[in-house]
Amino acid sequence: LSIRSKNNCINVNFLLLQRIWAKIKLKITGFRKSYANYKYKRSLKLKYYKGKIRILLVAVPRPSMWIFDYIYKALEKNGKFEIFIVIPPDPAYEYTMMCKYAKEVYDELSSKGYNPIMGYDFATKKNIDLRKAINPDIIFYSDFHKMHFHKDFYITNFLDKVTVLNDYGFSVMQEEKTVNFELNNTVDMYFRPTTIHMKMAAELMENKGRNTVLVNGSPKLDAIFDKNHIFKDVWKTQPKIKKRIIWAPHYSDGHPKDMYQYNAFYELYDFMFELALKFKDEIQIAFRPHPVLESRLVLKWGKEKQQAYYDKWEKLENGQYYPGDFLDLFISSDAMIMDSCSFMGEYTVVNKPLFHTVGSTTRIKLNDFGNEIYKFCYKTEHNLKQDIEKFIKEVVLEGKDVYKTLREDFIQRYYISKDGKNASESIVEKIVNYIEKGGL
């Protein structure tokens, strides 16, 4: 790629230097971590046998992205861990939105019975000192993008600690854009949900996936396979039984041209209301946008218009705006219309039909796992709006779901544990093995 400026090709030289420095920096970070970690791992084993290990779960400071419910249960069951939860500040958002998101996550986790710690003190407007406040032995991340971390919470500040990562989302998009961040390469263990994801890591990561560990599934989906878990019916009560459809649009408008872009929302936001009204006696629709869409719409539309749009869904007799736990929504639904990335991998597990919206400026760009799922997705073939209506009529209402068997086979192959343990139990078991062995 040649990027030219008025002064010939000087920008190309800068890009080459940046790429070379990125590789060198990663190796330096790896060496620093290995050196700092050597003695620490030996002391950690003794601490595990004689006392308790302090493990810190770092929440993604954006709503509805918490993945640690079943990991927390597995850690508690083990009995050798003292568990802490911190909600760090997210510098990727302007201050008001950052505070709003952090408080929403705090309320979400508190409602589940946890005692989360705010990583940012709103009174003093300073970050807490994790080493003084908690001094964790193990730090468990679920986000990897450096732009979402203040340096006080980023991995390079804890190279002497054992660090692990499980992505908050189920990766179906461009793996080269998500798997090779500094944090992914630096953690001691990077948990991956399928053999396909393991293979992609080996091919695309700077460290060739040497720190990756297969766990068969995602901890955020463990509740689906738990026979004792009680799901809530979160759908708006209707005068008669109707088919329940989730509409889950993404926010990714204006992405760089080499990246995926899912922005069909801007072609559908009025049309989906029209469909809800047209089929009001037969369907109900839950508007479940990506949490970040709200802030993007505030920038594009202004707060008043954004809020009015969300309220319009909530006031609709056979519609609703639902920002809560997506698993409750999934289980009691009949179908999903979406272009939200992670939901493609997550909704598949409930074995219900999924329609992927492709707008005029959509860029799909799936990874190897996403391409496998896309084979049994209903999708835009000719005309986005006509194809959605056809999906509702033929697949949802008439029950002509031709991909059901393909989904069943895929679920058995990639989501069902072969050893009887759920993903979270496997993760905790592998963390314990790491402590006892002093490495992978």
Image: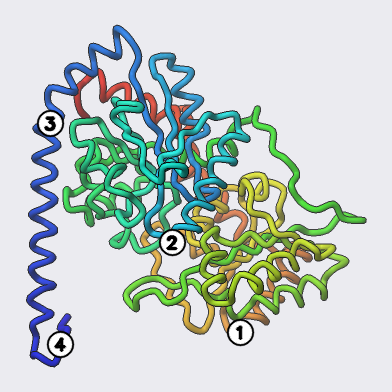
Can you say whether 212 is above or below 426 in the image? below
Q: Quick check: 329 left or right of 131?
A: right
Q: CA distance from mark 2 to mark 3?
A: 35 Å
Q: How many neighbours does mark 4 have within 10 angstroms: few (below 14), some (14-19), or many (20 or more)?
A: few
| Residue shown at 11% from the left, 79% from the top | 12
Q: Earlier in the sequence, mark 3 or mark 1?
A: 3
- What amino acid is found at the position of numbered circle 3 in the picture? Ala
Q: CA–CA distance between discs 3 and 1?
A: 57 Å
Q: Earlier in the sequence, mark 1 or mark 4?
A: 4
Query: As drawn, is 108 to the left or to the right of 11?
Result: right
Mark 1 is on which residue type?
A: Asn
Residue 329 in picture, x, y percent from top left: 67, 49
Label whose residue precedes the other's in the sequence (4 or 2): 4
Whole-angstrom CA distance, mark 1 to mark 4, is: 38 Å
Residue hosting label 4: 4
Give the quadrant of the C terminus.
top left
User: Closer to the observer: label 1 or label 4?
Assistant: 4
State if disc 3 and disc 2 touch (CB < 8 Å).
no
Asked whether residue 193 is in view, the answer is no
At label 4, the amino acid type is Arg
Name the side, left or right, on which 347 lies relative to 35.
Answer: right
Mark 1 sits on what residue? Answer: 383
Q: Residues within 10 Å of mark 3 (few under 14, many from 20)?
A: some
Give the foreground label among 2 and 1.
2
Residue drawn at 84 percent across, 65 percent down? 282
The residue positioned farthest toward the bottom in the image shown:
6
SS state under label 4: loop
Question: What is the quadrant of residue 51 in the picture?
Answer: top left
